[in-house]
Amino acid sequence: MSLTREIKVLQHAIHAAVQTHRPQQVRHLLASHQAHQFAQALAGLPSRLMEDALSMLDDQGRQAVESTSLVRRSQQANRTRRFIRFLSEASQYLNRFALGGLQ
């Protein structure tokens, strides 16, 4: 998915607002853009930043953004990636244990 310049700028602004702990700024960004645009910007952020941004919104704003399929798909993809990473780490741990124990 190719992001437009406007979405990239919005993504950068959301990232900055979350990193500096400014919930009012996150709410303002949602209010000044459509929920779909906001969701597009969120979908490109790391999962932790996305969750932090969503937590800074009021219930109505969060529901509007989460109702877009972009955020749901991105959240599902992030959960899948975390699970795959967990399985990989568990497999490495078990292999080390089977090959002579843990040092």
Image: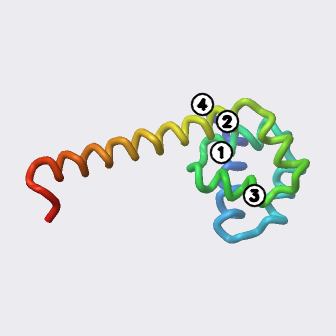
Q: Are marks 3 and 1 in contact (CB under 8 Å)?
A: no
For residue 13, say whether it is visible.
Answer: no
Bin the neighbour count of mark 4 within 10 Å (Cα to Cα): few under 14, some 14-19, many 20 and up.
few
Q: Which mark is residue 2?
A: 4
Bin the neighbour count of mark 3 within 10 Å (Cα to Cα): few under 14, some 14-19, many 20 and up.
some
Q: Nearer the viewer, residue 79 or 102?
A: 102
Q: How is the model colour-coded?
A: rainbow
User: Label 3: which residue?
Assistant: 55
Pair 3/1: label in front? 3
Between the C-alphas of marks 1 and 2, the distance is 6 Å
Vertical arrangement, residue 27 with respect to residue 71, above or below = below
Pair 3/2: label in front? 3
Q: Are marks 1 and 2 in contact (CB under 8 Å)?
A: yes
User: Label 1: which residue?
Assistant: 8
Identified at 68% across, 71% down, the residue is: 20
Between the C-alphas of marks 3 and 4, the distance is 26 Å
- Circle 4: residue type: Ser
- Circle 1: residue type: Lys
- Circle 2: residue type: Thr
User: Label 2: which residue?
Assistant: 4
Residue 27 falls in which quadrant of the image? bottom right
